[in-house]
Amino acid sequence: MAKKRIPISSVVIGMYLCGIDRSWLDTPFLKHRFLIRSQGDLSKLLQCGVEEITIDTDRGLDCVTTEPTEPARKNLDNPEIKSSQATNTITIPPEVARIQDLPQEVHGTDLGQELTSIAHTRQYMLEGVQDILETLGKTGGLALEQINQVTQSIMTETIDHEEAYIALISTRECSPALHDHALAVSTLAVLLGRAVGLEDRQCQDLAIAGLLHDVGLIKIPQALHRPLNELSGPGLEKYQTHPQLGLDRLTKKSTLSEQVQTCIREHHVALDGSGFPNNLAPETIQTPSRILRLVDEYDELLAGTHNGKAQTVREALQTLYQQGQKGVLDAQLVSTFINLIGIYPTYSLVELSTGERGIVTANSKDNLLHPTILLIQDAAHQPFAEPIPFNFSVLGSENLSPEIVRTLPPKEMGIQLDVVLEDWVTL
């Protein structure tokens, strides 16, 4: 990177900005490195009172003169802007987000690129899980090397891309295919296990148990693969044998660790004694099994496994919370999980009470109902010329604050998230 510090008077369209002379909290920019594409970008810099910027001449135009360019001179000669610069009292509209106080050497995350990359990686892992389960179903053999490859990928990939994986799981179109649910549960189990401080070995065992927890369903008649509220009598009893059926199949030709076997055996046990199998004492259930039970329940709620009606993320988290309060699930784990997921996960498409629509780009741990949003459509659902960063935290108490009223499926709305988020960077 060839960096150069220049006065604002020398800035022209086509330069690549990579630093400014003040906190990014005092600017309306979500991105902290970007190509100056328009007169609007120049005007924003001037209105913020910026006097000097740093440019990267390898990625944009170089500075060829220290004299003010015509566009910059025109703005500098504007009495209104000059006055605001002199007094430094320019008021940034409250709907503009102040995202991060970033030193110029800090690199953010390219949101669109991250989403595309993670989607491709997850698709590769899905194909691997599908191969594992198909081989198991046809031959009874367990491809342990392939299982280790997939689980190692989950362990590695989720370290730096936690929110992106949560988003893809929570906002995907749930498939009835076993491998889709298996990968979701495996990934979520690792994320929650890591959040509560489990060691890597325990997290990898959780990842394996997540991939294999429902293999007993392969031996269940297809007629019983329907919403659980439609099962009763012998059909329900047969379904409830699937944890043990799975273990019998898995251990016939392969060796799995004791923790993996325990998690699979116990993944439907409820702490109030209402789950199955009913010959296991709830008080003996350890944290890994409790984690697997919780994340399995969450993904089943998203898929509508219980009653055929898929729940939204917010509804599913509310259900988990209620089950935690009733003692069905571990309440402390539920609390940690809700904070991990966020009521509106990153990359969710949401609609405000004003009618505007935007993409969630970050969550606040202090207020899960008020994430940071990149507004992309106005109240009439027409696209903005340029997306607008929106942060609830900058709205004063005197303002009538809009609220998120619902989440929307991007594909049905004709929105490609990775395309919309192209060139937008955040931490």
Image (cartoon, grey):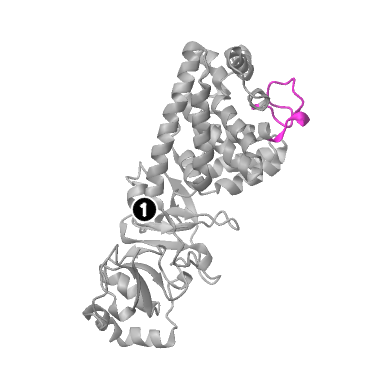
Query: Residue 384, image x and y in percent?
Result: 32, 60
Q: Quadrant of residue 270?
A: top right
Q: Residue at x 43, y 74 (%)?
A: 92
State left or right for residue 50 relative to residue 163: left
Give percent across and percent down for residue 368: 57, 54
Residue plotted at (54% across, 31% down): 300
Of residues 55 and 88, which is closer to you in this image? 55
Give the x, y percent position of residue 140: 52, 12
The reply to whether residue 142 is visible in this rendering is yes
Up the image or down, 328 lies above or below 163; here it is above
From the top left corner, tell me how far across and down residue 258 is, in percent.
68, 24
Q: Residues within 10 Å of mark 1 (few under 14, many from 20)?
A: many
Among the 4 quarters of the image, the one containing residue 205 = top right
Q: Residue at x 72, y 33 (%)?
A: 286
Tell which of 42 and 397 is nearer to you: 42
Residue 110, compared with residue 19, is above or below; it is above
The N terminus lies in quadrant? bottom left
Q: Name the residue located 70 percent from the left edge and 34 percent from the top edge.
A: 328
User: What secondary structure characterizes most of the magenta part?
Assistant: loop
Magenta residues? Answer: 267-287
For the residue pair 409 and 123, the one nearer the viewer reads as: 123
Q: In this view of the protein, can residue 220 be seen by the observer?
A: no
Is residue 286 rendered magenta in the image? yes
Per the image, the residue denoted by label 1 is 421
Going by the numbered disc 1, the residue's amino acid type is: Leu
